[in-house]
Amino acid sequence: MNRSTAISPFDREAREARFALRVAARLTERSAALPHDINERLRIARQQALERARAKTVAAPQTAPAVLNAGRGSLLFGGDGSSGWWRLAALLPVVALVVGMVTVQIQSEDEQAADAAEIDAALLSDDLPPAAYADPGFAEFLRQPAD
């Protein structure tokens, strides 16, 4: 029997529900070691999350997955066209993070190059030849106290 690898929305919901139950059970087990005030805050947060989830489920019933509209590309943009902008807006912080990391890396490399150039300039403009710094006797001479 050839079985399709696509997961139906009902199977996905059942898997998500089983996963949520396992996570909730594990969190409940671990919460026994937490102080009472933290347990109370977690309990209230769970209740609020459940109320929001119930309100969202009642307000927006489950719909079938979007079908590709001619010329609109609704699989990319989620069917109504507006959620595509939300996806792009969600990617904006990731893009900003990558740009920031690249900028920090470039700035760090520039600072390292400037520091190396400063050291090279100091060595080359010094009265001593650069080979003197590599001489073990010179290093010992520098360690001796001045009279």
Image (spheres, rainbow, N blue to C red):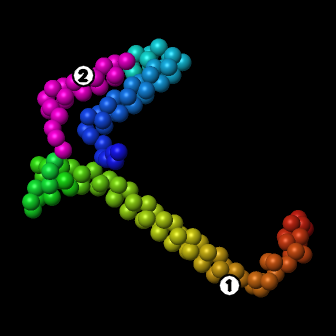
Are discs 2 and 1 less than 8 Å apart at CB? no
Region in magenta: 43-65
Please name the residue shown 79% across and 77% down the image.
Answer: 133
Q: Regarding mark 2 in the picture, which secondary structure is present there?
A: helix
Farthest residue to the top: give it.
36
- Closer to us: 85 or 127: 85
Majority SS type along the magenta span: helix
Give the quadrant of residue 98: bottom left
Left/right placement of residue 34 relative to residue 4 reads right
Give the quadrant of residue 22: top left
Q: Which residue is mark 2?
A: 51
Q: Position of residue 23 (x, y in %)?
A: 43, 28
**Number of residues whose C-alpha sits closer than 10 Å to that of mark 1, classed few (under 14), some (14–19) or many (20 or more):** few
Please name the residue shown 70% across and 80% down the image.
Answer: 123
Q: Is residue 42 above or below residue 125?
A: above
* Amino acid beneath label 2: Glu
Q: Residue 55, which numbered label?
A: none
Farthest residue to the front: give it.
1
Q: CA distance from mark 2 to mark 1?
A: 73 Å
- Closer to us: 86 or 1: 1
* Amino acid beneath label 1: Ser
Quadrant in which the N terminus is drawn = top left
Give the quadrant of residue 60: top left
Please name the residue shown 29% across and 55% down the image.
Answer: 92
Q: Residue 125, which numbered label?
A: 1
- Closer to us: 17 or 143: 17
**Number of residues whose C-alpha sits closer than 10 Å to that of mark 2, classed few (under 14), some (14–19) or many (20 or more):** few
